[in-house]
Amino acid sequence: MFTPTLLLASFLLATTVTDGDGELQRGLPAAPSITDLIRAQATPEVLQGFETVLLTQVNAIFGSENLPVANGGPVEPGVYVTVSPQQLLVFDSKISDMQGGLVPPGPVSRECKSGCKAALWSAFRQVWLRALDEAHSLGLEVPARVLFAAEASVPAKTLIELAYAAAETRPGDPPGFALLVNGSNSGLRSRGFYLLPPGGIRVSPGDNVLALRVSLGAGESFVVSAAHPRFAPQVEGSGWKLLAAELAKVKKRYPNKVAVIIDVGDDATVGDVVMVMVAAQKHFPSTVLTAGLPVKWG
């Protein structure tokens, strides 16, 4: 069963990595260190034929050429979600029609702390329960990650809504997340990400948190800010090259920080999010996504 503490502990790294090692948070387990993450990425899980299955479905739904184009890591097995402007599938089962890449309006689940729709809660809960039954009967483990194959033009806030629904319905610990990208000659690749906990988080000066944030607007416009009160001034601009340059300046001031929060707003697409990941990857490789949730200081 989902618990807020486990979700918070899982996602906390994205806003509190400081000087290379995980630090003990108040009332929570220690976040994994950067060394732990690198070690995990160096030994990816492989399932023969899994990538072929993914590519077949993506090409059937909207074409892999319409995935965001970027480099990335290897594709590891897990529950896979395919999102086009017209439809939403989990594995090969259609869950819902989409309206321009948005989940249709509907009642909110009373069980979903992030405010996800009841239809999503029900659909993802059934997926996890079936996976749990299969794991028990076959002596396997319940999938530990969710992969999103989203057409680049899909609104980024849809990706976040789906990720919360997947996290809050999984029995036990929440899953890891990966966004699939078109690696060109490298084939299908993945980009990992975290989420802010439902409702956001509050940090204190003793947590040594910067909480660097890139807030996206229309087109390629952005605002760079941070929760830390000494971070000033915030920077506004447009264009991914300029964003990369501004983030390089931030890194010089805060060399031990490795995480960036991408606040997608109402206008950003999945493609925009991937471009921010690319702009930030050299200096801030750990990405957390949010749609307006705060990191409160003090």
Image (spheres, rainbow, N blue to C red):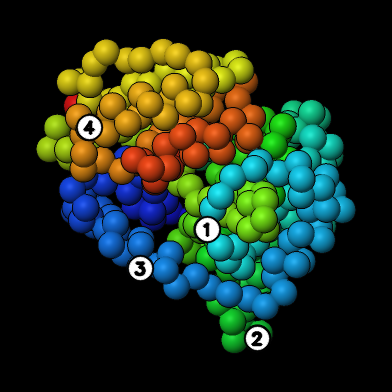
Residue 138 numbered mark, or none = 2
Element assignment for label 2: helix
Q: Residue at x 38, y 36 (%)?
A: 260
Crowding at dot 1, Cα within 10 Å, few <14 / some 14-19 / many 20+, comes out as some
Look at discs 4 and 2 and give the one toward the viewer.
Answer: 4
* Residue identified by numbered label 4: 252
What is the distance, in whole Å, between disc 1 and disc 4 at their CAs? 26 Å
Distance (Cα) linking label 1 and label 2: 29 Å
Viewer-side label of 2, 3:
3
Q: Is residue 162 visible?
A: no
- Left or right relative to 158: residue 43: left
Q: How far apart are the two marked residues, 4 and 3, measured between alpha carbons?
A: 26 Å
* Residue linked to disc 3: 39
Q: Position of residue 88 (x, y in %)?
A: 78, 45
Q: Are discs 4 and 3 less than 8 Å apart at CB?
A: no
Q: Which mark is residue 73?
A: 1
Report the front residue among 108 and 8: 8
Identify whether 218 is placed above or below 289.
above
Work out whether mark 2 precedes mark 3 in sequence or the reverse, and give the earlier one.
3
Compare marks 4 and 2 and give the one earlier in the sequence.
2
Tell me the quarter of the picture where residue 97 sits: top right
Q: Point out the frontmost of discs 4 and 3.
A: 4
Q: Give the x, y percent position of residue 266.
A: 60, 21
- Distance from label 1 to label 3 (Cα)? 13 Å
Specify the amino acid type for callout 2.
Answer: Leu
Q: Estimate the x, y position of residue 232 in percent, counting from the top left.
A: 24, 16
Q: Is residue 33 visible?
A: yes
Among the two numbered marks 4 and 3 on one chain, the one whose residue lies closer to the N terminus:
3
> Residue 251 at x, y = what percent?
27, 34
